[in-house]
Image (cartoon, grey):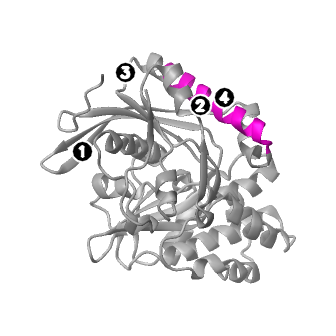
């Protein structure tokens, strides 16, 4: 039986798979709780590119039959467990637990539905390490959004910043509210949209935003994007693939623009939407793949005047979400809430996850 004592330090391996389908991020860190304050030390991290067959399966899982979906859930869990084992052998490490985000296929909290595939039993069986997964479903069952989950890590691990902004498949932001409750929500789609159109050029992503830089902003499309109903919603809110495919992509495609012009316009849209959620003069920690998009960061800085966007070291940029999912696993075994009702809108704070030994 593993003894989990946060005061002595708990070593966890976080697994993160985002909607952009870039691959699997793995981050091993030790978390320690001293005098009510958490600290962490990253031992090693790595990124694994998905095989094309698996990438295609994850991208089309929402339209699979029930049997195909169940099979992918099992196979993907086994794959994750194998990657954990390979990581352990490569770096000569032995985590006390694995914490897996899984891969989100369905996320419709309005009907109390969310699904992240990747069998925890498969992870534990293949790796030989206890696995915590399925972090969102309890919160959704409690009438919450089940997202975002990263803000609890922002509060305990990155509290020196006014805001923590992640530019991944979707952008999300978190900060402390005036009543000392954490506030967080999704802002808009980022790489999910940018990569969708960049792939039409034969490239996986727009390196440094070079395509966008060559494009011209279409002000009519920009206004239409900024007027999408989601942006008028208040309170806890989150985004998923369904919103992009149902509202964003059809709108963009209706304009018949070149790829470069689409990317320029959408980067401007991201910058405008971000500017609405950061105070003048604030300090913002920026992580996620979008932090490497030089053109996007230039536009965000230009639109949100006086705001300091701080991009940390590459390890933090690339692996912050995997790091925080490792932390969510630590919170689970420490019996500490990881889903904050002030963030998700659930009935009360709750401990998300399920463990397989």
Q: Are marks 1 and 4 in contact (CB under 8 Å)?
A: no
Residue at image point 57% right, 37% down: 24
Asked whether the residues under the numbered discs 1 and 2 touch, taking CB atoms below 8 Å apart as contact, a structural biologist would say no
Mark 4 or mark 3, whichever is nearer to me? 4
Q: Which residue is mark 3?
A: 94
Which one is earlier in the sequence, the residue at label 1 or at label 3? 1
**Quadrant for the N terminus in the image:** top left
Q: Residue at x 63, y 72 (%)?
A: 268
* In the image, residue 85 lies in the stretch drawn in magenta: yes
What span is in magenta? 64-86
Question: What residue would you read off at disc 4?
Answer: 75
Pinpoint residue 42: horizontal percent, then vertical percent: 34, 36
Q: Label 3 near label 1: C-beta < 8 Å?
A: no
Q: CA distance from mark 1 to mark 4?
A: 35 Å
**Element class at badge 2:** helix
**C-alpha separation, residue under disc 1 versus residue under disc 3:** 20 Å
Direction from residue 189 to residue 312 in the image, left or right: left
Q: Is residue 250 above or below residue 137?
A: below
- Circles 2, 4 touching at the beta carbon (< 8 Å): yes
Residue 176 lies in quadrant:
bottom left
Can you identify the residue that label 1 sits on? 39
Number of the front mark, 2 or 3: 2
Nearer-the-camera pick, 131 or 86: 131
For label 2, the residue is: 77
Image depth: mark 1 or mark 4 in front: 4
């Amino acid at each position: 039986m593993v003894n989990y004592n946060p005061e002595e330090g708990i070593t966890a391996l976080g697994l993160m798979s985002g909607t952009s389908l870039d691959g699997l991020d793995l981050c091993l860190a030790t978390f320690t709780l001293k005098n009510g304050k958490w600290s962490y030390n990253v031992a090693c991290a790595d990124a694994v590119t998905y095989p094309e067959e698996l990438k295609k399966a994850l991208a089309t899982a929402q339209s699979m039959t029930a049997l195909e979906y169940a099979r992918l859930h099992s196979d993907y869990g086994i794959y994750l467990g194998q990657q954990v084992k390979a990581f352990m052998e490569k770096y000569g490490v032995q985590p006390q637990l694995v914490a897996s985000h899984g891969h989100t296929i369905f996320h419709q909290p309005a009907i109390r539905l969310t699904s992240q595939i990747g069998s925890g039993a498969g992870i534990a069986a293949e790796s030989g390490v206890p696995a915590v997964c399925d972090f969102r479903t309890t919160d959704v069952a409690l009438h919450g959004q089940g997202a975002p989950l990263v803000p609890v890590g922002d509060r305990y691990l990155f509290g020196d910043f006014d805001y923590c902004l992640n530019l991944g498949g979707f952008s999300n932001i978190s900060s402390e509210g005036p009543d000392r409750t954490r506030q967080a929500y999704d802002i808009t789609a980022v790489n999910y949209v940018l990569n969708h159109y960049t792939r039409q050029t034969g490239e996986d992503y727009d390196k440094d935003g070079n395509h966008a830089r060559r494009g011209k902003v279409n002000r009519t499309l920009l206004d239409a994007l900024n007027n999408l109903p989601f942006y008028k919603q208040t309170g806890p809110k989150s985004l998923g693939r369904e919103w992009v495919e149902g509202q964003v992509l059809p709108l963009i495609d209706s304009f018949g623009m070149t790829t470069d012009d689409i990317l320029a316009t959408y980067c401007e849209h991201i910058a405008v939407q971000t500017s609405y959620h950061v105070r003048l003069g604030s300090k913002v920690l920026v992580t996620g793949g979008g932090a490497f998009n030089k053109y996007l960061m230039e536009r965000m800085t230009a639109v949100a005047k006086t705001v300091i966007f701080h991009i940390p070291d590459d390890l933090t940029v690339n692996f912050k979400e995997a790091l925080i999912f490792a932390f969510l696993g630590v919170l689970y075994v420490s019996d500490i809430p990881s889903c904050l009702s002030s963030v998700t809108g659930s009935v009360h704070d709750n401990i998300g996850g399920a463990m397989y030994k």
